Amino acid sequence: MAKKMLMEILKHEKVSSNVFRLTLGGKLTAQPGQFVQVAVSKTYDPFLKRPFSVHDCSADTLTLLYRVLGRGTGLLAGKRTGEQLEVVGPLGTAFPVETADRIILVAGGIGSAPLFYLLKSLRAAGKKVTFLYGARSKEELILREQYQMLADEYGEATEDGSCGHHGLVTELVADALDKGRTVLYACGPEAMLRAVAELAKANNCSCYVSLEAHMACGVGACLGCVVANAQGEYVRVCVDGPVFPAREVF
Amino acid sequence: MADLTVSLGRLQLKNPVMPASGCFGYGEEYASFYDLSVLGAIVVKGTTVNPWPGNAPQRIVETPAGMLNAIGLQNPGVPAAKIKIRRLARYNSPVIVNVSGHSVEEYKEVISVLEEESTVAAYEINVSCPNVKAGGMAFGTKPEIVFKLVTALRPLTEKTLIVKLSPNVTDITEIATAAESAGADALSLINTLVGMAIDIEKRRPVLANITGGLSGPAVKPVALRMVWQVTDVVNIPVIGMGGISSAEDAIEFMLAGATAVAIGAANFVNPTVCPEVVAGIEAYLHKYNFSSVREIVGLAKRADNT
Ligand SMILES: Cc1cc2nc3c(=O)[nH]c(=O)nc-3n(C[C@H](O)[C@H](O)[C@H](O)COP(=O)(O)OP(=O)(O)OC[C@H]3O[C@@H](n4cnc5c(N)ncnc54)[C@H](O)[C@@H]3O)c2cc1C
Ligand SMILES: Cc1cc2nc3c(=O)[nH]c(=O)nc-3n(C[C@H](O)[C@H](O)[C@H](O)COP(=O)(O)O)c2cc1C
Ligand code: FES
């Protein structure tokens, strides 16, 4: 159940030129795929909290991985160890655990954030996992070693060819799929998610995608974060998602 | 302990604090944060006869000390809403249903469907939604039309009838007077202020609807001024809203003349803002030795206020 709490910054590390890993202390337990809303300021400007996926979680720590994009994440990057942040969570749906012969996680850039926690949980449950990681360049394959170490099979793709397969990560997905016997979990840019969903559909595999939307409340009250589902009805990314079965939204 | 009760028509509230419509869903969304029974009332989302799909995304954008929204009154229609509203019976707070429609007939029908519902204590007639093409604000910018609508609705119910006013008018006091003379028991103000934002990279409006309604702390001075003006000319109670984020803000509205207050966008930022405001008002009354919250209503207008 979602609650509001103050969490202390235990660790705040720069992991690439514009990505930070933020470890917060406090008891907020989330499932892989869920997110939290973080106050980046104590004033009214910026006004809204910022949504971030849970990158990792233990009984008394919560880790986020975020890219500095605009004003809010810029302010967040300036916070120091020992400061307190107001956090609301856990929010949204989790990645459902499905039994399948093959489990493939597909990450695009910073979309890798929620998939680390999923990968860890699946491995802890004794599942074999293939992790496929794509980005524009090697530098954007953020924390690539941690996925490489944990996954049973690991593949990477960069658009500029600076690391792994020269091309799109979806090309690796096509090779790794076992028709009808695979479950796919994906988070990344929308074009990547659509391509993964299409591959899943063509090969009769289940597929879950994690979506993003501009949010205000994060709890389903404002109807600000909707996307059109396959029937053309508007569903809320914050409570009906962010994790959706791909066929529901594409 | 000071007396926090206030009345809106025949409706008694245990305290003057409620969430603003559209900012609290159908209530349950905030039930994991606190017991909704602490609220003076629960105000639910704008409800129409048939389901409304709402506007295409992007629907919201953050602005300095506030936000624009263009939800477009997405709601499941009154038959489905009724079931959600019934679930609120378990809380010890009266439910106020925000009502909208494309025509006088549609407003009437929403009321007739809800009239037998014991959970529904009052209607808030929304004549001020800036985000729908037909209905909504089209009803709220002309005093004659407000008068006609309220006159048509008044005989349908003995429940408290509240009219929610738009700030997007030249003179809000004219509309307020029209609603009062047609038999409204109370007024709510303000709804959102029409605004917009442009994405300079994409070189087009951020919101798919182009314009949206501005709310949050940025609108507070405008809302406060309108509450002051309206309470000068009407004798029915006013629910003040627009940018309230703290007990201090709520007290300002009450000192300006509001009998009760509603909190909108601040719920998004601080899910426990409503109970915090109730506690803050109580502390203020205690600090300055007021025995009832009603004593501070309009106090800032009184020449003898020392
Ligand atoms: C469910 C969910 C999970 C997310 N998880 C992560 C994560 O793990 N790591 C990460 O780096 N980013 C994540 N994001 C994106 C992150 O929320 C935005 O990058 C961030 O809000 C940008 O804030 P800003 O003030 O720096 O940017 P600005 O562009 O200045 O923000 C202006 C407004 O737009 C909103 N906004 C801007 N970009 C986005 C976006 N892509 N998605 C949603 N709202 C946006 C902001 O919240 C703010 O309200 C997630 C988004 C969602 C919806
Ligand atoms: C996301 C959102 C949805 C809203 N939906 C409604 C609605 O359905 N009916 C209505 O009368 N007002 C609606 N409003 C207006 C609010 O009830 C309130 O009048 C306004 O936001 C000003 O208060 P605030 O500054 O505290 O948010 C909505 C406001 C927001 C931000
Ligand atoms: S962010 Fe408010 S409903 Fe999703």
Image (spheres, rainbow, N blue to C red):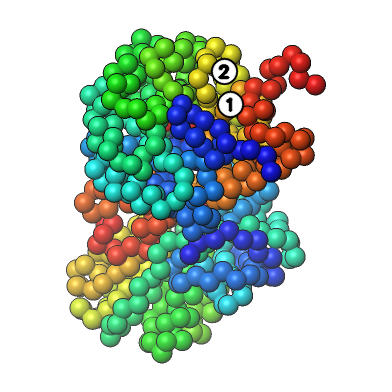
Q: Which mark is residue B258?
A: 1
Please state the chain letter of the residue tagged with numbered disc 1 in the rendered image. B
Specify the subunit that label 2 lies on: B
Residue B78 against residue B33 in the figure, above or below: above
Q: Position of residue A110 (x, y in %)?
A: 50, 63
The picture places residue A25, in percent across and down from the top left corner, at 65, 70
- Residue depicted at 61% across the width and 43% down the height: B278
Q: Is residue A162 visible?
A: no
Q: Secondary structure at mark 1?
A: loop
In the rendered image, the residue lying farthest to the right is: B306
Do the residues under discs 1 and 2 have CB atoms within 8 angstroms?
yes
Name the amino acid, label 1.
Ala
Q: Is residue B127 left or right of residue B270?
A: left
How far apart are the alpha carbons under marks 1 and 2? 7 Å
> Nearer the N terminus, badge 1 or badge 2?
2
Query: Which circle marks residue B2 in the picture?
Result: none
Identify which residue is drawn at 25% across, 32% down. B112
Residue B191 versus residue A203 in the image, above or below: above
On screen, residue A130 versus residue A231, left or right, reads: right
The label shown at residue B231 is 2
